[in-house]
Image (cartoon, rainbow, N blue to C red):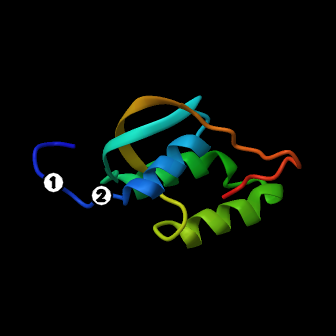
Amino acid sequence: MRGGRGPAYPAPVAKALACAAGKTGLVEVRRAEPVPAGREILAAYLEKYRDDPEKADFVAFLQGDFGRRVGTFRMLATRTGVPVHLEDEDGDVPY
């Protein structure tokens, strides 16, 4: 978001991420990009779980997957006013 254009997530991905993050409605993503210090942020977060054997699988997953399905990003978006229903009648997430 500083100055130049960096890598950006496709709008549908960013919209889904914004909805899944607990927003109350659909957003229009203006810009989304990876956080440059993402690995350092993850390492600091995982530090509190380092000695917990019950969290070993969680820690291993996040460390091994970072950058593929898990990552840190910053996003600038505006609400559209369109409501989002994250679950269908059966309680399943439709996407």
Discs 2, 1 touching: Cβ within 8 Å: yes
Quarter of the image for the C terminus: give it.
bottom right
- What residue is shown at x 76% (from left), y 45% (from top)? 87
Horizontal side, residue 59 vs residue 11: left or right = right
Numbered disc 1: secondary structure: loop
- What residue is shown at x 50% (from left), y 71% (from top)? 68
69 vs 55: above or below: below
Query: Mark 1 highlights which residue?
Result: 5
> Which class describes the residues within 10 Å of circle 2: few (<14), some (14-19), or many (20+)?
some
Q: Which mark is residue 38?
A: none
Residue 18 visible in the shown view: yes
> Marks 2 and 1, how far apart in space?
8 Å
Horizontal side, residue 46 vs residue 41: left or right = right
19 vs 43: above or below: above
When asked about the image quadrant of residue 39, the answer is bottom left
- Residue 8 placement (x, y as % from top left): 30, 58
Query: Mark 2 highlights which residue?
Result: 8
- Residue 24 placement (x, y as % from top left): 59, 29
Q: Nearer the viewer, residue 25 or 6?
A: 25
Q: Which amino acid, mark 2?
A: Ala
> Which class describes the residues within 10 Å of circle 1: few (<14), some (14-19), or many (20+)?
few
- What residue is shown at x 50% (from left), y 54% (from top)? 43
Horizontal side, residue 72 vs residue 60: left or right = left
26 vs 93: above or below: above
80 vs 64: above or below: above
- Residue 41 placement (x, y as % from top left): 45, 48
Quarter of the image for the N terminus: give it.
top left
Horizontal side, residue 56 vs residue 34: left or right = right
- Residue 6 placement (x, y as % from top left): 20, 57
Q: Which amino acid, mark 1?
A: Arg
Numbered disc 2: secondary structure: loop
Q: Residue furthest left?
A: 3
